[in-house]
Image (tube, coloured by chain):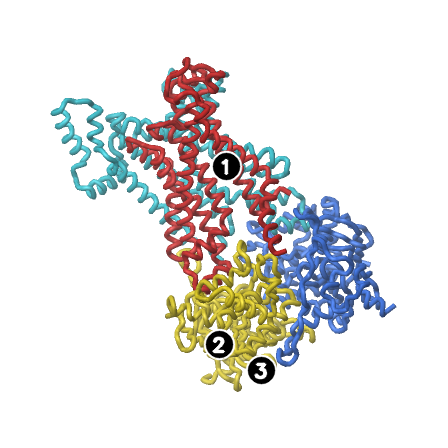
Chain colours: A yellow, B cyan, C red, D blue
Amino acid sequence: MLRLENASKIYRVGTFGGKQLRAVSDVSFTVKDGEVVSLIGESGSGKSTIGKMILRLIGITGGKITFDDRDIATLRGGALKAYYRNVQGVFQDPFSSYNPIFKADRVFEIVRDHFFPGVEDREWDEKVRRSLESVGLNPRHVLDKYPHQLSGGQLQRFLIARALLLDIRFLVADEIISMLDASTRIDVLNLLADLKERGLAVLFITHDLSLGYYISEDAAILYRGCVVEFGRTEKIYDHPAHPYTRMLMASVPRLDQKWEDVEIELRAKQEDLSTGCVYYERCCDPHRSERCRERRPRLVEIEPGHSVACDRYSTDG
Amino acid sequence: MRRYFGRKLLIYLVTFFLAVTIDWLIPRLTPGDPIQNMLARAALNANAAETMYTYYTHAFRLDLPIWQQYLNFWNALFHGDLGISTYLFPTPVADVIKDAVPYDIFLLLPAILLSWWAGNKFGAFAARTKRLDNTALPIAYLLTATPYMWLGILLAWLFGIILGWFPIAGAYSYTMGTELSWTFVGSVLHHWFLPFASLFIIFFGGWAIGMRNMIIYELEADYSHYLEALGAPRKLIRKYAFRNAILPQITGLALQLGVIVAGALVTEVVFSYPGIGYLILAAIQNQDYFLVQGCFLFIIMGVLLANFLIDIAYVIVDPRTRKGMVGE
Amino acid sequence: MAEAKDKKKRNEFLYFAFRNNKLKVGISIVLFFLVLAAVGALFTKHDPEAFVGPLSDPPSSEFWFGTTVFGQDVFAQFVAGVRATFIVGALGGGLATLIGMLVGFVAGYRGGMVDESLNVLTNIVLVIPTFALLLIISAYFEVRGLILESVFIGLTSWPWAARAIRSQTLSLRSREFVDLARMSGMKPLRIIFTEIAPNMMSYLVMAFILQFGGAILIAATLDFIGLGPTTGFSLGIMMQYAVLWGALPLGTWWWFVPPGAAIAAIVGALYFMNVGLDELFNPKLRET
Amino acid sequence: MSLRVEDLTVYYQTLRGDVRALESTTFSIADGEIMGLAGESGCGKTTLANGLILLVPPMRHVGGRVLLDDRELPIADVEAMNRFRFKEISVIPQYAMNAMNPTRKVGRMAAELLRSRRIDPKRTLPELEKRLDLVELNRSVLKMYPIEMSGGMKQRMVMVLSTLMDPSLLLADEITSALDVSTQKAVAKMLVDFRDREIVKSIIVITHDMSILYQIADSILIMYAGQLAEKGPTETIIHSPRHPYTKLLITSLPKVGVKHDATRLTGIPGKPPLLLDPPEGCRFRERCPAAFERCRDVPPFVEIEPGHFVACWRETESNA
């Protein structure tokens, strides 16, 4: 359904675009129908940039993103609108996703004006009511309210209901629960899982490993714009291959076991590595060699459904 | 860092180029023909006017094609030749301006710098307590709202006419020539005070308001709360807040230059103080376009130069811009 | 219950508005002069130009503001002057704010090269001492009306508004609800005017108030040095005549004090309103 | 006994009346104890922290006392508290990333701060440099401006600054939330190291992230809507909590290894009450599955086992 082929994004930084910042470099992965893929990376890893590129909110500098084998960069006008009938996004800050001076359900009216001009009121209200209930919200409690009168969890589910109005096939969820309280987080996560049952594909972008594990079949670990590991979630969590993923697993605080004493290299600001492996500087793996500095390893499948980009496993080594 | 200044310099050069072009363009756009106006004033009989017209057109080289005139204008500019003033006939425009500029600098520099210093100190002081904020601040707002010339007139009337402490016209008393003696300097200062005071008071209000808003913003900043949490005395917190609040006031100084020029022009007219303002008005009243162009150019160069100096000062004083550019 | 909640938000705004005395003082002064400008003509007994009274007569019951050195009724001139001031303020300030909005919205929303070039333009007009420019332009125009003066002022004083609006648009553009609107297939222009602009009402009002006050000051200064409208009266022209015809040595203060005081009061009140609105819209400066 | 808080009550003054952010809280911390202070956003944990060190308007001290090493802290008197701030009680603020003056070199700011507290910076320089080594910060950092430092470096610098005077109690407010995972672990371990080296006697770690507390906290205090719900040793709170809210909170946290289709976790229905006019008695009443009419009165914060306190009628009744 959705495929990224060596997608890259380079930002012009500094006055008159002097320096270049490589936010995303040569990212490739696919999301099949009804599948949840989690994109896990720390702040600054470029995960939100990938989300925005898929949603056509920002341009793409290199590579291609295709939806049903059509390059989304070429979509204009009507074709772009049709694309948005199939692909929608929900963002991190629920309170910033609503225009504060209008009521919350204005987001439905905008969808109606642009996608369902012909529908009469009665049929539309019924459609809205059904999609609200499908996200576990009681229409009477949430309609005709200002955004500040609803909780974060309600607002996020409100946006998912908006996406469902368009019967979308693919949802980009960019850190949608990181600003919610622990108790309401789970409802939104369960909702995403239920929608997956009903055939909705989701790209779940997060920095929290445990959330990724909870709902996604496949996971992509992102570090400074590159996918360092990709594959079935259980496989990656049970035996992480890439040194960065291993360090993540060891460092993330868990509720069931104490931290192992894995040594961590605390680096000052790293400069931009355009060639070679991005994790070279912080890599404590004994296998690290000069070759890691020159050549950027490609994703290699080390076992069915589990591939990693590290020189240790590269076949032509 | 180099790129930052390069970009700034580029903007100033483009601005200068545009301003000069506008300055050259305006007389040509206006209805009527400058030579015609000039001759009409001279009230000559018909044929004398005819010959004079061809002579002057040729003298001012207005018979050449437009772009030719434009190029001549530029290379004349580079030779410092701003043409001849018709109002003060044979003296070239450049010399006329050269006489007026010292008075301008003597009036403006102290007025701006002193008011900037005093206004910022007062603004910081006013932000200290609610009571002060509600009494001192309205006064500052009223000051900035006061038209320059009105304050000038009031001061002239109060101190000049009623109390008679200060003269209200000219830069020094007519009885003496311009030689370097104590009495002359005394007289200059005596004449200088009222125009200086009226400019100082109004600028002062502007800086005070700017500082009050900025310092409240800095006192609310995270680093102020952190110092409070570590028990630092109010004095240190206020010192840091003032130091950070004064930085935007530096760029504020640059942005206000345009307005400051306006104030100076008018105040000079009220006190007939022989600076560029008084000169440009006289030139306009006598339709001496070359002098007007000369004055305008001079004002532009002054403002651009000041802006550039202030930009340099800002980068030196504020580490964030310096480090910011190098760091990321 | 929902309806009550919604009304509560709106009158909460009014509730604070009326407690903010800076705003109350500002509005009342401006209204006073506005009424004077609109209705004042009924109270004036004489035509501002006519020579009706004794020369340089101090204020009396007959001539509330006394007479000029030619025997004209100062109060009649004053009323005409205040009206001219409001016209220049509204037109000049309005035009400047409109251009500022246009430049600010386009630069803020489009970004990239468009933003860069508009920014350079704004900086240029900001750096050029526009007052000197106005001097020259008005000098070359023989016949000058109030409208022409307002247009000139509007054309040269828009950068302040443009800068404020651009920075506000930039911050609003990165908000997620704009992305959401884009994903609903909304056209950029419609996004600016239905999503971004309504959020900036407070900014637009404040920008207009500052431009209004600025236009009045510039106009009065221009009029004072004789480059204002060649027909009709304005407070600046009154002061020019007063100084020109020796009001100072003659001591006829009533000829030059009221016009200047009116300008200071109106512009001061406008700035006051602006501070009040600023406190209303961003609680950090709130008085409590 | 390092810290003793008795019936502390702090409200926020707003234009619409008082927000009752902290309601009569009583607890104590022993020397050398790292207590985690956890709860959802708006539960009052930051109000409690600020109440101890910087109780300034719009916060208002309504009642209760605070004793540090058996001396009462004048928390309501902003001036008198200065004597204790930085020397006896200190804080690593939530906004540590921009807590340092942007236009001052870090070393110079530290010197001016010390001098303003009548401490000779030269005498403390060797100790300061020793502490920089502890947090793996190069000494050249003192000549840097904050803008030149990464997030992790700034966090560790503020940590060193705040603990320079070996305060008895350190409040660490959300020190890990803005960091990425690896720096987070390093900073958390350094905090424990500071306690082990007796640089600080006891620490309150304020966070919403329970898994961090499981790693470094000796005990955890759970708060809900301005009231204390439960306090106890970390193992008990995480694995055998007694208060209904703590139970639901712990079970709603996804752990690595828990898959959706295997075990479906449940959230807590409803949302926390507005504290402008909070419900009577136990404020979790409306969302609590075990609520009954006794919950209308405020449940006392009772020690049901040594070191394990709970504020819930169900637990104290069955236990009595």
**Distance CA(mark 2)–CA(mark 3):** 24 Å
Residue D120 vertical position relative to residue A84 in the rendered view, above or below: above
Q: Chain of mark 1?
A: C
- Name the mark on residue D253: none
The residue tagged with tag 3: helix, strand or loop? helix
- Nearer to the camera, B277 or D221: D221
Mark 1 neighbour density, 10 Å: few (under 14) some (14–19) many (20 or more): many
Q: Which element type, helix, strand or loop, lies under badge 1?
A: helix
Q: Residue at label 3?
A: A235
Is mark 1 in CB contact (under 8 Å) with mark 3?
no
The amino acid marked with disc number 2 is Cys
Do marks 2 and 1 share a chain?
no
Tell me which amino acid carries mark 1.
Leu
Q: Quadrant of the N terminus of chain A?
A: bottom left
Q: Amino acid at mark 3?
A: Lys
- Which residue is situated farthest in the top direction here? C54
Q: CA distance from mark 1 to mark 3?
A: 68 Å
Between label 2 and label 3, give the one nearer the viewer: 3
Residue in the picture at 48% in, 80% down = A299
Considering the numbered disc 2 on the image, is that residue within a helix, a strand or a loop? helix
State the image coordinates of residue C184 (x, y, percent, origin top left). 46, 64
- Contact between labelled residues 1 and 2, with CB atoms less than 8 Å apart: no
Mark nearest the camera among 2 and 1 is 1
Residue underneath mark 2 = A292
Image quarter of residue B25: top left
Q: Which residue is mark 1?
A: C270
Q: Residues within 10 Å of mark 3 (few under 14, many from 20)?
A: some
Horizontal and vertical percent position of residue A66:
42, 75
- Ranked by sequence position, the earlier of labels 2 and 3 is 3
Residue D314 makes an appearance in the image: yes
Q: Based on the displayed image, in which of its 4 quarters is residue B184 positioned?
A: top left
Total numbered labels: 3
